[in-house]
Image: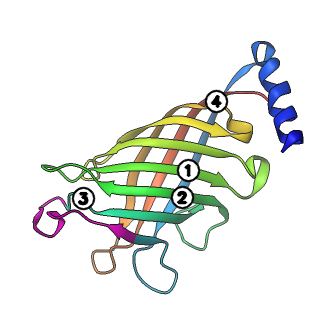
Amino acid sequence: MAEALKSVDKWFENLDQSKEIKTKLHFYYQDVLTGEKRTIWQVAESDITSISPTSFGLIYMVDNLLTDGPDPDSKVVGRAQGTVGFADLNNTALEMGLNFLFTKGKYKGSTISVLGRNPVTEKCRELPIVGGTGVFRMARGVVITSTYSFDDTTSNGVIEFTFYIKHYSK
């Protein structure tokens, strides 16, 4: 703990001399609601979820695979972990609180945190980046997301993400 605190303290003390940089990332989120390799689990629902046309109050925990291509067998870059809830009484829109954890490559061990409204019926959606860790300490920016594919039978989908991030060099 003391070593980690020293490292972050040193980084923070030198932050004024650090260069702000821009990073653009692109990958796919494998949304698996059914089958043996399921990555999304319902954890709660409201009293009106069953009669709501928008599934209001339904909440899931997510631990989805992130890949560099749309095929689930593409190269793995990390995981998206957090909560997703249906949060609009009148339209199908999600509240997403996700941490994108990088498990491979130069960003291994770093995270990007996203928190925002995702109106899933729109073709392209914009979500805010609210922070990060590791390489992405003090990250901010936006994520553009769209549904790449969706299987009506299984409810499994592939979601495309493009991150536009501003953060500081380490």
Quadrant in which residue 22 is drawn? top right
Q: Residue 120: horizontal and vertical position, in percent? A: 29, 52
Mark 1 or 4, nearer chain start: 1
Q: Residue 41: horizontal and vertical position, in percent? A: 42, 72
Could you tell me which residue is drawn at 49 percent across and 43 percent down?
114
Q: Is residue 40 left or right of residue 113?
A: left
The residue beneath circle 2 is 81
Specify few, some or many for label 2: CA neighbours under 10 Å numbering under 14, 14-19, or 20 or more.
some
Q: Residue 102: horizontal and vertical position, in percent? A: 68, 53
Question: Mark 1–mark 2 contact, CB under 8 Å?
Answer: yes
Mark 1 to mark 3: distance in Å? 21 Å
The residue beneath circle 3 is 57
Specify few, some or many for label 3: CA neighbours under 10 Å numbering under 14, 14-19, or 20 or more.
many
Question: Mark 2–mark 3 contact, CB under 8 Å?
Answer: no
Question: Mark 4–mark 2 contact, CB under 8 Å?
Answer: no
Residue 65 shows in the view? yes
Instruction: Judge by depth and name the residue closer to the eye, 55 or 163.
Output: 55
The quadrant of the picture occupied by the C terminus is: top right
Mark 1 to mark 2: distance in Å? 5 Å
Q: Residue 84: horizontal and vertical position, in percent? A: 38, 56
Q: Which mark is residue 138?
A: 4
